[in-house]
């Protein structure tokens, strides 16, 4: 998809102190996404050994899958062709500490010349985040919720007004919770407007998405 927005308007909104442009970039397919898909399949087939193998890579820091690497190459070529960083006026790119986000970021923006930072507050929800003192059925992780809130405050305090975040499905779902934004596909890039007064993100518009959405659409 091409870029369809007015950079001048975005800059004008920022000067008025109202909004920032934030591009949400979900990491390309990782081996954890593949394992999650396989885990669901093996549960249906009641293949216990396969389930153990499929689930083993979900709780670690898995790299991109072969499809994920292809997704990065595809989107990177589109970004370069569209001169995305220049046209959009991207001033800063931040990614989580996980290798799948780092590899996606490096592949898509590593040669752009834009400053890149690694932020632990962008890390995805993890089983170790579970807070056993909270009742089941609630947002069961104070640590994860705190990271989301810290990210909102970080965005508001940064001097840049056009920022790319390369992170994760569940994290972005929570970041857009007030707008009801749908889950991003692996490798998808979505342009959002971040309101500085309310610290909320709108539903956004998808600008880029790999032609192959991958074998798994789960939130990982």
Image (cartoon, grey):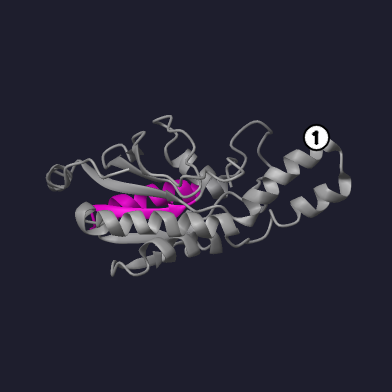
**In the rendered image, which quarter is residue 166 located in?**
bottom left
| Front-lying residue, 4 or 195 | 4
Residue 132 in view of the camera:
no
Asked which secondary structure carries label 1, the reply is: helix
Above/below status of 63 relative to 19: below
Q: Which residue is mark 1?
A: 44
Mark 1: few/some/many CA within 10 Å (<14, 14-19, 20+): few
Above/below status of 23 relative to 198: below
Is 154 within the magenta? Answer: yes
| Front-lying residue, 52 or 18 | 52
Q: Is residue 118 left or right of residue 12?
A: right
Q: Which residues are magenta?
A: 146-167
Residue 51 is situated, as x and y percent measured from the top left of the image, at: 81, 47
Residue plotted at (28% across, 44% down): 2
Residue plotted at (34% across, 70% down): 111
Q: Is residue 108 left or right of residue 194?
A: right
Q: How many marks?
A: 1
| Front-lying residue, 162 or 103 | 103
**In the rendered image, which quarter is residue 137 located in?**
top right
Residue 127 is situated, as x and y percent measured from the top left of the image, at: 67, 50
């Amino acid at each position: 998809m091409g870029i369809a927005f007015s950079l001048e308007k975005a800059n004008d909104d920022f000067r008025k102190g109202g909004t920032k442009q934030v591009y949400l970039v979900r990491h390309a397919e990782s081996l954890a996404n593949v394992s999650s898909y396989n885990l669901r399949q093996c549960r249906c087939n009641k293949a216990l050994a396969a389930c153990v193998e499929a689930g083993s890579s979900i709780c670690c820091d898995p790299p991109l899958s072969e499809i994920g690497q292809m997704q990065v190459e595809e989107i990177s070529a589109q970004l370069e062709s569209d001169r995305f960083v220049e046209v959009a006026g991207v001033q800063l790119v931040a990614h989580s500490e996980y290798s799948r986000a780092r590899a996606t970021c490096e592949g898509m923006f590593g040669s752009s010349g834009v400053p890149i930072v690694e932020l632990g507050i962008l890390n995805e929800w993890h089983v170790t985040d579970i807070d056993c003192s909270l009742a089941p059925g609630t947002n069961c992780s104070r640590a994860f919720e705190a990271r989301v809130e810290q990210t909102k405050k970080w965005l508001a305090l940064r001097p840049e007004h056009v920022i790319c975040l390369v992170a994760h499905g569940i994290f972005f779902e929570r970041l857009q919770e007030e707008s009801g934004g749908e889950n991003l596909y692996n490798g998808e890039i979505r342009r959002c407007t971040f309101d500085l007064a309310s610290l909320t993100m709108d539903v956004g518009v998808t600008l880029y998405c790999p032609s192959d959405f991958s074998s798994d659409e789960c939130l990982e």
